[in-house]
Image (cartoon, rainbow, N blue to C red):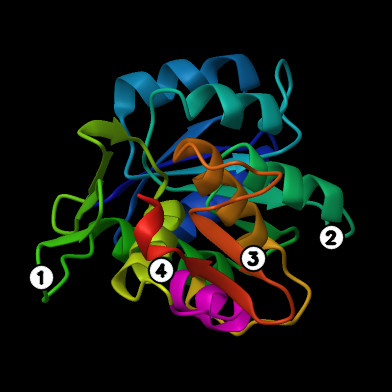
Amino acid sequence: MSVVLLAEDDERLATLVQDYLQAHGLTVVVESHGLQVGRQVQGLQPDLLILDLNLPGKDGISICKDVRAHYEGPILMLTARDADADQVLGLEVGADDYVVKPAEPRVLLARIQALLRRANRVPEDSDEVSVGGLHIRTRAREVSLHEQPVHLSSHEFDLLLTLARQPGKVMSREYLFTTICNRPYDGLDRTVDVRVSHLRKKLGDNSEAPTRIKTVWGRGYMLVEDAW
């Protein structure tokens, strides 16, 4: 049974979400104070963290950034309806996805299940994908570059794997978004752009003039085969 840590200070909402998710087979632990979330993550090692942006003591963005230093599981952020900047910032500091509040419990459950499936997915094809010095172990969901481990979030791993399976091929934002997020692309969401930015940083690519994951303007992104 998957364990979810719900960081939410609204007691009524937390109880509603906890009851709904537990009725659908998840174990849910609630933490209401921002300063305690990091400790809970380290002790509990949940399969997924749901993180509200506005917690007392410490805000969700700061928590997400700190937690990502030692936690590689999926993080789902709860954001305000009109907080586009918060959504982008949340993705930039390590969140895997976000849900706009007030969220319908069934929508929240669907997002959680998608993230858990992705984190636990065991590919049926080759166990390793290699491009030069880049090695991706699909079953273990591990990445190394020139024998040095690279720590990626679940979405970052899926994006890199998708690009690396077909090096030299330009892939559109729509294709990449639907592949890693498992929902339709609305033409505005910046999830893919944020993930690519993260990958470039973690893989030692130059963000000003990238050579490993290139932007093909008007078309999408491409992993360059001979740049590794």
- Asked if the residues shown at circle 3 and circle 2 are in contact, with their CB atoms under 8 angstroms apart, the answer is no
Direction from residue 151 to residue 32 in the image, left or right = right
Observer-nearest residue: 141 or 150?
Answer: 150
Instruction: First in sequence, mark 3 or 4: give its number.
Output: 4
Q: Amino acid at mark 1?
A: Ser
Q: Position of residue 201 (x, y in %)?
A: 55, 38
Q: Which residue is mark 3?
A: 215
Q: Which residue is mark 2?
A: 81
For label 1, the SS is loop
Q: Amino acid at mark 2?
A: Arg
Q: Magenta segment, principal secondary structure?
A: helix
For label 4, the SS is helix
Instruction: First in sequence, mark 2 or 1: give its number.
Output: 2
Q: Which residue is mark 1?
A: 126
For label 3, the SS is strand
**Is-magenta flag for residue 178?**
yes
